Image (cartoon, helix red, strand yellow):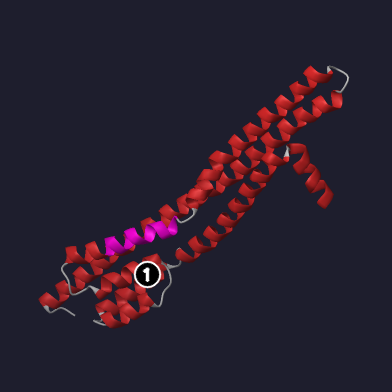
Amino acid sequence: MQNTFFQFIQKGGPFIMVPLLLCSVIAVAVIIERMIALFKASGDSGRLMEGVRELVMKGDVRGAIELAENTPGPSAAVVANGLRNAHLDQSEIERTMEELALAEVPELSKRLAWLDTIVTLAPLLGLLGTVTGMIRAFHFVGGAGAKNIGAVTGGVAEALYATATGLTVAVVSLVFYNFLTDKVREIVGTMELRATQLLNVLATMRQRETTGIR
């Protein structure tokens, strides 16, 4: 198995295959880390919102704050921020939640740029391997003619190995990059939804306090 792996690297050209191998390792590490982080961030904030609405309607804002603070995820953090500023005007509450949401987005997108870079870089490295492999093949054609067919086919094989590896790394990285990017958009959309829901809950609470309805 180990010999087969090193033979594969040798056949594709170490100067191209080693960077491609490094790209694949980085891509796998980023994919695993981001999937874990994003699935944690996309917790059940709908249940949180139901609990917050119930507590706020009972007048227990402190209890709602504690509930939000003890719930993981950026949506819960935005809700907790809005509740802590419930004494402010509606527009000011909205601005504080928006500011926190904007601060959360870079954390959600962290290291996705690496994956985006690998999507672009891997095929280019594969193309470079194709060029160097063909140069090697033509070099042997010019130097040995038809006497050393093995050297010629070795150069062509090097080009194909590098191209296939580069495209494979890029395709897999692209699929997960799009998936993770869509997951970030979904979490950001959920944050905006929970912020709007909280504003509506607080507006209802203030209306009840004004009219004296319980």
User: Is residue 126 left or right of 13 when viewed as pictured?
Assistant: left
The foreground one among 36 and 196 is 36
For the point 69% across and 36% down, which residue is it? Answer: 162
Find the residue positioned furthest to the front.
143
Q: Is residue 98 magenta?
A: yes
Q: Quadrant of residue 148?
A: top right
Indicate the position of residue 48 as horizontal and vertical percent values. 38, 72
The foreground one among 127 and 53 is 127
Q: Which residues are magenta?
A: 97-109
Indicate the position of residue 168 as horizontal and vertical percent values. 65, 41
Indicate the position of residue 98 as horizontal and vertical percent values. 28, 60
Q: Quadrant of residue 131?
A: top right
Reading the image, the residue beneath label 1 is 76
Any part of residue 154 in sight? yes
Q: Main secondary structure of the magenta part?
A: helix
Q: Is residue 142 magenta?
A: no
Quadrant occupied by the C terminus: bottom left
Q: Residues within 10 Å of mark 1 (few under 14, many from 20)?
A: many
The kind of residue on which mark 1 rests is: Ala
Any part of residue 1 in sight? no
What SS does tag 1 mark? helix
User: Is residue 153 left or right of 168 when viewed as pictured?
Assistant: right
Residue 30, above or below 130: below
For the point 55% across and 49% down, which residue is it? Answer: 176
